[in-house]
Image: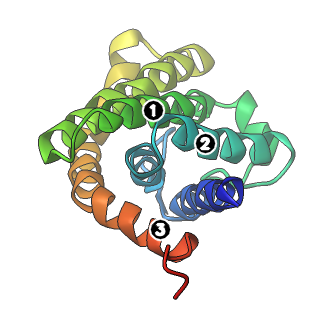
Amino acid sequence: MAWMSRLAMISVFTGLTIVGARVTVEIGPVPLTLQTLAVFLAGMVLGSRDGALSQVAYVGLIVAGLPLDARGLGPAVFAGPTWGYLVGFIACAYVAGYITERANDRMWVRVLAGLVGSAFVFIPGFIVLKFTTGMAWDTALITGVWEFQVENIAKVFLAAGIAESARALLLRSLLPPLDGK
């Protein structure tokens, strides 16, 4: 039964990432989305292993042909400039989860987990952006990283603030009470 609860929670965060992709603002070669909020939450709520698995499932669904990325391209997204961010979601969720697992419910550690985790999205994202578009390094850094930092920091704080409540809610809704009521 525990594996079914884990699978359900992983699926919830895969779904949240899909929904986050639908909240998109086109600002250039890389759209602004709510996906990273879902990725931070996946790691902070599910932990390293299951958080990363939720993102493996998300990327795997795109590879399998579903148009679940921000622009609805499906597997064609891997021929464009944004696939580095998608692959980075997996590492981000793992790292954010790994740090959070050691947090002892401290808000500042969850914020740190989100900030460190976000580097695992932005570094591969910016490198892929640079090489697929031919941008200069400084232009790719501005376009693919710096333009997103105000929103990124806001999403980190939001995720850190709601992570423990979300975890408790999921555990209550997916796991039966011990006394059988």
Against 62, is 166 above or below? below
Q: Which mark is residue 170?
A: 3
Q: Are marks 2 and 1 in contact (CB under 8 Å)?
A: yes
Q: Dot 3, how many residues are within 10 Å of its Cα: few (below 14), some (14-19), or many (20+)?
A: some
Rendering coords of residue 3 (x, y %): 69, 53
Label 2, on which residue? 55
Secondary element under disc 2, as helix, strand or loop, is helix
Q: Residue furthest right?
A: 64
Secondary element under disc 3, as helix, strand or loop, is helix
Against 131, is 1 above or below? below
Rendering coords of residue 23 (x, y %): 49, 64
Q: Nearer the viewer, mark 3 or mark 2?
A: 3
Q: Which mark is residue 92?
A: 1
Tell me the CA gap for discs 3 and 2. Answer: 18 Å
Residue type marked 2 = Gln
Residue type marked 1 = Cys
Sequence-wise first label, 2 or 1: 2
Q: Nearer the viewer, residue 170 or 16?
A: 170
Rendering coords of residue 85 (x, y %): 53, 32
- Look at the image and name its color scheme: rainbow
Using the rendered view, name the quadrant where residue 90 is placed.
top right
Secondary element under disc 1, as helix, strand or loop, is helix
Q: Residue at x 79, y 39 (%)?
A: 76
